[in-house]
Every structure is written in C-alpha cells, then in structure tokens.
Image (tube, grey):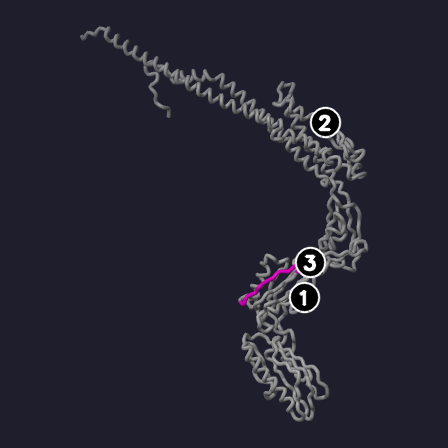
Amino acid sequence: MSAITSTGLGSGLDIESLVKGLVAAEGSATSQRLQVKEAKLQADLSALGTLKGALSGFQSSILALKDITAFKARTATSSSTTSFTVGANSTASAGSFAIRVDRLAAATKVRTLAAPTTTVASGAYTVATQAAGTTTTDTVWNLKVDGLVLSTKTTLAGTTGGSTDVSKIAADLDADLATFLGTHPGYSATGTFAAPGNNLQITKADGSAVLIEQAVTGGAGGGAITQATFAGAGFVGTTAGFAFASDTALVGEGTLAISLGAANFNITASAATTLAGLRDLINQSTTNPGISASIVKVSATNSQLVLTSNVTGAANTIGVAVTGATALPATSSLNRLATANLTTVQAGADSLIQVDNVAVTRTTNNLTDVISGVTIALVKADALAAPATLTIAVDTNAATSKVNDFIKAYNTLAGTLSSLSQYDAKTKKASRLFGDATLRGIQSQLRQVLSSSVVGGVAGVTTLADIGIKTDKTGSLTLDSVKLNAVIAANSDAVPQLFATTTTGLSPVFDKILTNYLATDGPLTARVDGVNKNIGGITVQRTKLNIRLNEVEARYRKQFTAMDNLLGKLKSTGNYLTQQLTPPQKTA
C-alpha cells in the first residue's frame, strides 16, 4: 500500500512523480555508464577465470606425465594362478621364469593339552604279592601325584618268606601317603596300600583328574620289585590332568615369558586370572610381537588355549617359559602352559619354490625380492607338479595411453585459448581476450615447447614429431599410432624420457611455464586482481552516485514543496477575492 503524502495538494501537481523523474534523469547517464563498464569487467573476469582453469587442468595432466614410471608399466602373468599369482612394477625386466611351489610358508600354532582319556581319579592301585621264599634286593622307588612327590625310597629291603616283604613296602608307602595328605589338603585317599586287596584311590577336592607317575628301578633276581609289580590300570597316562575344564577355569599365579622367534613379552597372571582372562591379556598386550590367543571349547569339560603366530616362517616358533608359579599341583598351576606341556598343532615353516630349478626359501608366501620388480603371491604347493611359467613383458598400452592423455589435454587447452581470443568477421564481434598480450604470450610459449627438442633423451627420439605427434591446421595435435608403436617396440625408454627427463623433458618444461603464469604473483593473478579492483571501484562510484542523487532528490522535493505551498496560498486568495467581488443574487 502506497504511503499517503500531501505533496501537490496546493498546486494539484504530481510532485512525487516529478521529483523521481528528475532524479532518475539526473543519474541515468552515469548509472548506465557504470553498468556497462561493470558488465565488461565481469566478462573479463570470467574470461580470465576460464583461462586459469584451462591452464590448471592442463598442468594437472602434465604433472601425471612427469613420473617416468607411469610410462614404463609391465604386464605380469602366471600360467597357473592356482599355484601363484604375480605382479610387476616398472623396474622389472622383461623375461620368463619356470616356477614350482614346493611348500607354503606356515605360521606356528600350539595349544594346551587335551582332557585325559583315562579318569585316573577312579583307578585302583594294586600292590602285587610276591611268592614265598623270595628276597627283594635294594631298589630305587619314586611315586608322584600331579608332579608332587608322594614317596621316594632308595632302599626297600624285604624279608624272606610269605608276604612280609610286601607288607613292609606297603607300610612305608602308607606312611608317606599320610604325610602327603597332611601337607596337601587338596587331596584325599580312599583305601591304603596295605588294605585288603591293596586298592587305593586318590582324588582332588575340585574333582579334576589326578596324574600318577611311578618309577621303580634297580634290583636283580627273581625277587626284585619291578614296574609291573605296581601296575594299576587306573594310573595309566602320564599326560593326564593338564587340561582346562572351561574358559572360566583358573590358570594359576605366575609369569609367562612368551616368545615368538627372537621377540618376547611377559604376561602376569593373578590368582583370579581365568583362561579367558589370560587370552585377553595376551591379545591386548602392547608388547605382543604378533601372537593371537583364542579358546577352543572341545566339550563341556574341556577347553583349550590356542596360540597362533601372526607371521609365518620356520624361525617364528612360539615358546612359553613359566616363572613364579604357585606351589599348586602341576595339573592346576600355570606350568600347564609351559612349552613342554603344549601340543604343536602346526609347525612354522618357510616357503620353498623352485625358480628355474634353483631352490629359493622365504619366511612368507608373498615374495617381493626373488625377482627384481616382481611380486609373487604363493597360492598352493605341489612339489610333484610341473613348473608353471611366469612371464614379464613391457606394457605398450601404458605408454600409448599416456601419450593419448597428453594429446587430449593439450587439444582441450588449445580449444579454450582459441575461443577466448577469436574474432568473428561476419558479426564483427571479438571474444573478451581477443588481442590480449598475456594470452598471446601463453600460446606462443606452448607452441614453442611443442616443436622443441629434448636434451638428454634417447637418440633419434627428441621431439614429438619423432613419436608421431603433429599439429594440424587448427592447432590441434594428432597422433600417428603406427609410428608411436614402432618407437616403443624399438626402445621402451624413448617415450618416457621424451616426456619425463628431469628439467629438460616436455612435462617439466610445460610445468615450469604454467607455474609461472598460475603463481600467486604471476601475470594472470595480477590481471584478475586488477579487474577485481576495478569492479570494486565501480561499487564505490555507484555508492557516491546514490549519495548525490539522494541530495538532488531532497533539493527538488524542497523546491517543489515550497512552490506547492505558494500556489496553495495564491489559490486561496483568489477564491476569497472572487467571493467578495461577486454580487449577491436577488431573491424572487
């Protein structure tokens, strides 16, 4: 809704329109001039931005060509990818090799012992009775329960006749058993050595299996006490009882010095450390050189700790030394994890391959240093298989692709430069940078590089023309693919050196020119800054114009308002005089 104004009431004129029209007329010429000038500057700025973008894009393409290895790609193939795969970099030499994989590298894996197959806690220990009239000679006796000595004797002299000698032995054993039970409250016994039938059963309070070890040596003659004399079916198996019932089973206190090859780290177990807790301590150790611990639940009463090396190789064996273990029975102490009590699931091994009938071993299955520049990944071993062929060849497509990339990038730049500097004779219209000295300088320098010779390249291949690149009448580059392929076939280093020779190759030379123009203190940046400054100047001029027009509008408004007031007064006076001079009308 328009604002209500009293301007013009006295004169009846549309003073508001008159003021605005006069102000517009006052500023029209200047405003139009500034607008035209700003439009040209914006067009210049856009053209310069297009130029910088085109140069920057070409420079990115050129930088990719400065890497000489980009031109020297190699193809690597395996005639039996089920045996090995292969890759090669630019340093690999062309050739072929006979490869046979005899053995894959393997990582060491060990585990704790399995649960006993014989429940020794329920076994009966029987002492046989010797025949009457025999004499037992001196004998060394050694009886252990879970590695703890129950009885050890160096003299067991029996007496002649009946079973006196056997009774003497049984009495000695029973005395030692009583002492053992008194000092090891975790164990209990049913029966004795001297009991009728000579049945004895030793059990542990936690219900786990009991390991019985016995040894009887020495003695001679028919009356000697032999190993068989004390054979009890319930005490078979010297490795029984070293398993863990579950992952919550306590492992015992002490320190494990775990080694992987020459590296090692320590794990300390407390009285509350479980098998699962030990696994986590190993995996979370910051000094762990590369061993992973896991638990295999074999059954409801049998869990095994598995240690696996994260690196392959015969030298990367796993060892465990136990120190500071508590004086618990061997079957419930940390000693269960000592190397002697671990089973090897898989021994570490080096890989073994035959390269042209020459044996080569490495610690891994990823061989990076057997053939220079070639990586061989072993997949499957078969020492009886026929050798497969590994072939390395020059990848001619890589150099061709790079050359085509260069031509495409240059032609794109040339097209942009042409569009920015063209003149249409029919319309007589020129592009914003037509005749621009900076653009002409860029075109001149780029064309000069195209026709120049590279110093330090392969003899006979020092210009773009030597590899089949020419300039057509439009200024675009074209490629003779036959000539390029012939150059690559003759010398695979020719094209890379033409483009990427340090400082003198085409890529470094182009890059230097472009860097100079695109630098923050370069000519294009200076031009852009100058245009932006001029645009800023127009903004300042437009601001000043608006200030001046506001002043003009205020002056016009003041003048027209005064005129309107004066006309209003004159009109009022005229009306009064007319009224006074008009005679009164007579009434009938």
Question: Residue 40's image quarter?
Answer: top right
Question: Residue 461's image quarter?
Answer: top right
> Looking at the image, do the residues carrying marks 3 and 2 touch, with CB atoms under 8 Å apart?
no
Mark 2 nearby-residue class (10 Å; few <14, some 14–19, many ≥20) = few
Q: Distance between the residues labelled 3 and 1?
A: 15 Å
Q: Is the magenta stretch mostly helix, strand or loop?
A: strand
Sequence-earlier tag: 1 or 2: 1
- The residue that disc 1 covers is 344
Q: Which mark is residue 423?
A: none
Q: Assess whether residue 140 is covered by the magenta stretch.
A: no
Sequence-earlier tag: 3 or 1: 3
Q: Which residue is drawn at 74% across and 28% down?
A: 471
Q: In which quarter of the image is the N terminus?
A: top left
Q: Quadrant of the C terminus?
A: top left
| Amino acid of disc 1 | Thr
- The residue that disc 2 covers is 448
- The residue that disc 3 covers is 312
155 shown above or below 110: below
Question: Residue 289's image quarter?
Answer: bottom right
User: Visible in this render: residue 190?
Assistant: yes
Assign a secondary structure to mark 2: helix
Q: In this view, does 566 lie to the left or right of 472?
A: left
Assign a secondary structure to mark 3: loop
Q: Distance between the residues labelled 3 and 2?
A: 58 Å
Which of the two residues, 106 or 277, is positioned nearer the viewer here? Answer: 277
Mark 3 nearby-residue class (10 Å; few <14, some 14–19, many ≥20) = many
Magenta range is: 260-271
Q: Distance between the residues labelled 1 and 2?
A: 73 Å
Q: Residue at x 72, y 34 (%)?
A: 503
| Amino acid of disc 2 | Gln
Q: In this view, does 149 lie to the left or right of 496?
A: left
Q: Is residue 423 left or right of residue 39?
A: right
